[in-house]
């Protein structure tokens, strides 16, 4: 085991897979220079300019070229630099990548990984801070990965690169500097398996991505007050670990879902609805969602704080849930 | 090849390909009118010389991407009309198991990477296929078929810039039938047009008479060879005319009948037939080719109409391996 930051864990995972499989290549803006986040540092020297391709600022073509290369047998890592820029490549992602296998009756499996660093980070304002992962959980044909730790980022990225399904990989920008321990070699982590962060029977708290450490802090504060909850990090929101969540809810009877994304129509709504569908309304005494208000992300730190989920908000929500 | 027109065998092949495309689409139109084929149907009647003239220059491992008007491209690249027709009918034996229909026919086994329901949608995909082939050190190339409407979408600019920048083995073919859906392309396109746009990005480009299959073949032969030699992307602007409406249900009443009548005199099949007759091919031989094409497509229609529907469970297959349908129904 070696202790590295989350973004270094991601770098090592991609490096390992590019060494392992010559079909893997990476394309995106500035990737030959190491990528905006250093996630491809030193790749150019090892793999050369044909496999580490710095591209024009042409998002739709970055996405479409990755797809086209997959259709002739390559396994591209498509780097979007920042999640928000994928809006410029939505046709290629939604109409092409997500549809091609189905539309063509299974003739092709586009094995692409689309990396989209998302979320609030250093007051980047409305076009560089969004979390819209719920959109993609709504989209058939793709896997949606939302890790929160160095270990999970590394293991899930390895799994993503080896996957025959298209994988949308949401790197958590705000956590890039957080350290964790990764193994060498990095072993793949299967999709759809939640990680238990804390254990308790007062309530079930479900979260993912950048909200995980925030919620974990809130859960620690609750524990100090003698309130112990089950905290589950979903790690991937499609597929998601329905069994783990329902097993926990059957124990606690109370469910809180927390995400950094806007609360309205967020994936938390799906989690709550699904639990009611499967476990029955009788399994739940109370359920609650906690997310951002339905406003764009403001720039000023004084305003951005209004949008953020905080440990204090988590404490308040859990206390309301069990009251 | 110095002059493909010298090769009678090649001309006869081109004639047969065009005849098969025409027969396929006329058969499909009739079946659509009879209520046998559901959904939208975009035919390319009058444009057959483009598909035939380009694809005769391709190898089976060359890849093409196509657009919503792609039956001709698929047939010319080697797809089986029987399986295409079954797909139009939404049957299990169709290329896409009934999940794609007319706008999404693909046959990866002959390098046909798919028709596309989004204008310009195939451009980045073809460029990516070319980049993948280059990464694999293959000498296969990618060919991207798109219409005049596509040159006003962003992926056209992005894709040509990209292909030129990385000197990729891709041939762009702008199949210009003069109409973007129901709107004359020149009424919505600024500047001198597609070849000048391509040249501005460093992509070699020429205009060809797309109703003259020998001209298309000759230009494609040179362009394909140049692309295969590693000389970077090329563009052919192939001017043709869409005899029918945008879809099978569009009577195209917005244009004068005389215009269509005039275009019919330039019908690419008739034109090549006249050349073949001049070179001594008996009219009965040409009729035989046309009749064989019609018989092939009539049989494809009969078989498709009798073919089994996909089992309902097929709707849940080919989505994704992980997290597909276990509890998403």
Image (cartoon, helix red, strand yellow):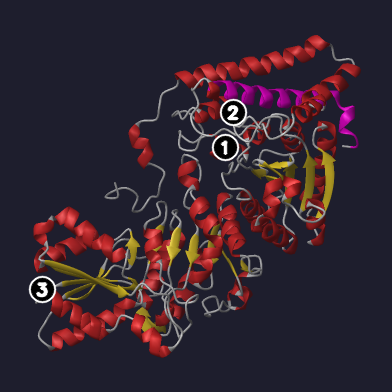
- Mark 2 secondary-structure assignment: loop
Q: CA distance from mark 1 to mark 3?
A: 55 Å
Label disc, if present, on residue A201 of the rendered structure? 3
Instruction: Measuring from the top left, give residue A141's x and y in whole percent.
Output: 42, 51
In the rendered view, would you say A86 is above or below A321? above
Q: Are marks 3 and 2 in contact (CB under 8 Å)?
A: no
Instruction: Measuring from the top left, give residue A285's x and y in whole percent.
Output: 10, 66
Image quadrant occupied by the N terminus of chain B: top right
Determine which quarter of the picture holds residue A23.
bottom right
In the rendered view, would you say A159 is above or below B209? below
The span picked out in magenta is: B2-31
Q: How many marks?
A: 3
Relative to B253, B94 lies left or right: left
- Mark 3 secondary-structure assignment: loop
Of labels 1 and 3, the one closer to you: 3
Q: What residue is drawn where x is 73% and y is 29%? A: B46
Q: Which residue is mark 2?
A: B80
Instruction: Measuring from the top left, give residue A203's x and y in whole percent.
Output: 14, 73
Image mark 2: chain = B
Instruction: Measuring from the top left, give residue A320's x and y in whole percent.
Output: 14, 77
Relative to A188, B111 lies left or right: right
Residue at the top extreme of this rendering: B284
Q: Nearer the viewer, residue A262 or B157?
A: A262
**Magenta span has B28?**
yes
Q: What residue is drawn where x is 79% and y is 40%? A: B239
Label disc, if present, on residue B107 of the rendered structure? 1
Are the residues under marks 3 and 2 on the same chain?
A: no
């Amino acid at each position: 085991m070696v202790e590295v930051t989350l973004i270094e864990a991601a770098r090592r995972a991609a490096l390992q897979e590019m060494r392992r499989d010559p079909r893997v290549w990476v394309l995106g803006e500035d990737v030959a220079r190491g990528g905006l986040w250093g996630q491809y540092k030193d790749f150019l020297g090892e793999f050369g300019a044909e496999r580490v391709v710095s591209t024009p600022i042409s998002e739709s073509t970055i996405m479409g070229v990755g797809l086209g290369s997959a259709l002739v047998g390559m396994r591209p890592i498509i780097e979007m630099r920042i999640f928000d820029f994928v809006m410029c490549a939505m046709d290629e992602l939604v109409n092409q990548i997500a549809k091609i296998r189905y539309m063509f009756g299974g003739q092709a499996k586009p094995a692409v990984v689309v990396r989209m660093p998302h979320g609030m980070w250093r007051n980047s304002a409305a076009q560089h801070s969004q979390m819209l992962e719920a959109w993609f959980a709504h989209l058939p044909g793709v896997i949606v990965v939302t890790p929160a730790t160095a270990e999970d980022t590394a293991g899930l990225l390895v799994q993503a690169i080896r996957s025959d399904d298209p994988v949308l990989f949401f790197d958590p920008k705000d956590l890039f500097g957080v350290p964790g321990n990764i193994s060498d070699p990095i072993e793949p982590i299967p999709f759809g398996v939640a990680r238990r962060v804390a254990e308790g029977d007062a309530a079930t708290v479900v979260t993912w991505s950048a909200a995980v450490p925030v919620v974990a802090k809130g859960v620690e504060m609750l524990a100090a007050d003698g309130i112990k909850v089950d905290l589950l990090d979903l790690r991937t929101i499609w597929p998601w670990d329905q069994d783990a969540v329902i097993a926990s809810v059957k124990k606690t009877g109370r469910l809180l879902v927390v995400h950094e994304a806007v609360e309205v129509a967020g994936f938390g709504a799906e989690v709550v609805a699904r639990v009611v569908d499967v476990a029955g309304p009788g399994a739940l005494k109370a359920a609650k969602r906690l997310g951002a208000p339905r406003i764009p992300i403001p720039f000023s730190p004084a305003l951005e704080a209004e949008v953020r989920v905080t440990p204090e908000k988590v404490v308040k929500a859990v206390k309301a849930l069990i009251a | 090849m110095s002059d493909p027109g010298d090769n009678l065998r090649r001309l006869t092949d081109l004639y047969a390909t065009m005849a098969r495309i025409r027969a396929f689409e006329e058969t499909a139109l009739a079946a659509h009118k009879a209520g046998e084929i559901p959904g939208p149907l975009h035919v390319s009647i009058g444009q057959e010389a483009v598909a035939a003239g380009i694809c005769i220059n391709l190898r089976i491992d060359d890849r093409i991407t196509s657009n919503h008007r792609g039956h001709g491209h698929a047939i010319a690249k080697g797809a089986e009309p029987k399986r295409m027709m079954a797909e139009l009918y939404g049957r299990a034996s169709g290329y896409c198991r009934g999940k794609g229909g007319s706008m999404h026919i693909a046959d990866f086994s002959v390098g046909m990477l798919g028709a596309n329901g989004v204008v310009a949608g195939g451009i980045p995909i073809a460029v990516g296929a070319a980049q993948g082939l280059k990464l694999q050190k293959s000498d296969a190339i990618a060919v991207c078929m798109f219409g005049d409407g596509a040159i006003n979408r962003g992926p056209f600019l992005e894709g040509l810039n990209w292909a030129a920048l990385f000197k990729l083995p891709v041939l762009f073919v702008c199949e210009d039938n003069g109409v973007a859906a129901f709107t004359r392309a020149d009424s919505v396109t600024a500047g001198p047009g597609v070849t000048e746009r391509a040249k501005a990005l460093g992509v070699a480009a020429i205009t060809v008479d797309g109703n003259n299959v020998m001209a298309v073949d000759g230009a494609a032969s040179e362009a394909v060879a140049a692309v295969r030699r590693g000389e970077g992307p090329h563009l052919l602007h192939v001017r043709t005319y869409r005899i029918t409406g945008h879809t099978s249900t569009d009577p195209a009443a917005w244009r004068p009948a005389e215009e269509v009548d005039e275009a019919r005199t330039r019908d690419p099949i008739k034109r090549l037939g006249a050349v073949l007759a001049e070179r001594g091919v008996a009219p009965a031989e040409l009729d035989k080719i046309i009749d064989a094409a019609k018989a092939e497509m009539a049989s494809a229609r009969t078989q498709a109409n009798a073919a089994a529907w996909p089992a309902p469970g097929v709707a849940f297959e080919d989505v994704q391996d992980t997290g597909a349908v276990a509890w998403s129904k």
